[in-house]
Each structure stands twice: as structure tokens, then as C-alpha cells.
Amino acid sequence: MENAARLFERIDAGEIERFIAATTITNIYYIIRRVAGRVVAQDAVIHVLSDLNICTVDLEVLEQALASNFEDFEDAVQYACAVVHEVDAIVTRDAAGFANAEIPVVLPEDIDTIDRFG
């Protein structure tokens, strides 16, 4: 949680240009609603929508994800979004899921070692 807070501090300070796949928004809502309820989940989604650029998940992204050599389809969709939107790095807790990535992958705890994204 501390790493996520630091990541959002850097986003709020304008130090990091940020992107998230549209499909991730529903996952965020679902997980938070189960743990903390609908109101907290809605607030979290509102925060994400105001802080992050939303990457569309369209036919191009899904075809790239299917054609990739990623084992996990959700990771493949995330990666395809990153490729389409030409991001400089992917921040994830699951670096192993992006072993075949041609884009640098950064763990949240290493976010302060990165000078600049985008």
C-alpha cells in the first residue's frame, strides 16, 4: 500500500505520466467493493479516472494480446495497451508476468529509482 501511495504522490506531482487499461477499472471497482463497499469503490474509481489516462481496449489491443507470447491474457492486454500507447515503462507487482516485454518493467517499490516516465 505504501508503494501505491508513493506512486500516486509522483503522479499527483506531475512527475509521472500515467496510463491504465480500461478493463482494469472494472477490476479495481470489483475488488474494492468486495472489501470496503460500493461507496469506497466508486470513490476509488473516481480518483483513478481523474489521475490516469485510460487506454482503450479495442480490437487492435485484443488482437495484439492474443498474438503475444504472454501466458496470462490479462497481462497480455496490459502489455498491448502499453505498446499501442507507447509508454516508457510498466509498473507492476507481477514483473514475472511481463518476462517477454520489450518495454522496461518496474516494481512499485523501485518507482523512486526512475527519473521520469513519458
Image: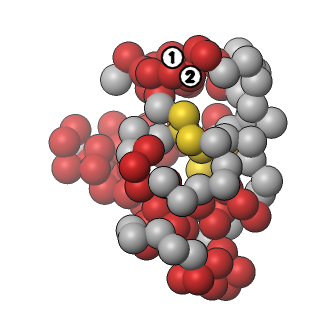
Q: Residue at x 51, y 17 (%)?
A: 6
Compared to residue 79, the image places residue 88 above or below, namely above
Residue 51 placement, left or right of 87? left
Single out the residue that lies furthest toward the left: 35
**Camera-side residue of 118 and 24:** 118
Three-letter amino acid code of the residue under disc 1: Arg
Q: Give the quarter of the image for residue 26.
A: bottom left
Q: Give me the C-alpha separation between circle 2 and circle 1.
A: 8 Å
Compared to residue 115, the image places residue 32 above or below, namely below
Q: Which mark is residue 6?
A: 1
Residue 86 placement, left or right of 47? right
Q: Give the quarter of the image for residue 62.
A: bottom right
Task: State the quadrant of the C terminus.
Answer: top right
The mark tally for this picture is: 2
Q: Residue at x 59, y 56 (%)?
A: 101
The reply to whether the C-beta atoms of the residues labelled 2 and 1 are less than 8 Å apart is yes
Compared to residue 68, the image places residue 35 above or below, namely above
Name the residue beneath numbered marker 2.
Answer: 111
